[in-house]
Amino acid sequence: MPIYAYKCGACGHAKDVLQKISDAPLTQCPACGAEAFAKQLTAAGFQLKGSGWYVTDFRGGNTAASSPAAAPAPEAAPAAAPAACAACPAATGSKD
């Protein structure tokens, strides 16, 4: 069963309530009795458990494996010219 956070708009009383999803929302404040008790939006609290999930996953650590763009790129060496073959006119020196 989920835990819902409620807060009274009249007196400011706050309370966490364990309720079924199908239960009607509370409207009456238990502290002052006003009909201003309303659910609050809260962040979900859950943990991923089981094999394959690690505490350190997606923490944003600064490692070489996780940020290859941060490392300077090595300069590219100029491509070597292809070797001329013996049948080419430039290799033999003739201009036939």
Image (tube, rainbow, N blue to C red):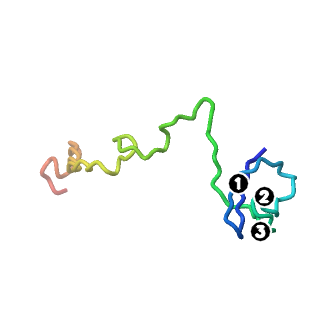
Q: Residue at x 49, y 44 (%)?
A: 58
Q: Are marks 2 and 1 in contact (CB under 8 Å)?
A: yes
Where does label 1 land, which residue? 15
> Mark 1 falls on what kind of element?
strand
* Amino acid at dot 3: Ala
Q: Residue at x 77, y 47 (%)?
A: 18
Q: Which residue is the extreme one toward the left?
A: 93
Where does label 2 land, which residue? 30
**Image position of 61 with respect to 53: above or below:** below
Residue 45 shown left or right of residue 30 in the figure: left
Question: Residue 25 lies in what quarter of the image?
Answer: bottom right
The mark that comes first in sequence, 2 or 1, is 1
Spatial separation of the CA atoms under disc 2 and disc 1: 9 Å
Q: Quadrant of the N terminus?
A: top right
Residue 67 position, x and y percent, is: 37, 47
Q: Nearer the viewer, mark 2 or mark 1?
A: 2
Where does label 3 land, which residue? 36
Spatial separation of the CA atoms under disc 2 and disc 3: 10 Å
> Mark 3 falls on what kind of element?
loop
* Amino acid at dot 2: Pro
Residue 24 shown left or right of residue 58 in the figure: right
Q: Nearer the viewer, residue 85 or 80?
A: 80
* Amino acid at dot 1: Lys
Question: Residue 52 lies in what quarter of the image?
Answer: top right
Q: Nearer the viewer, residue 40 or 56?
A: 40
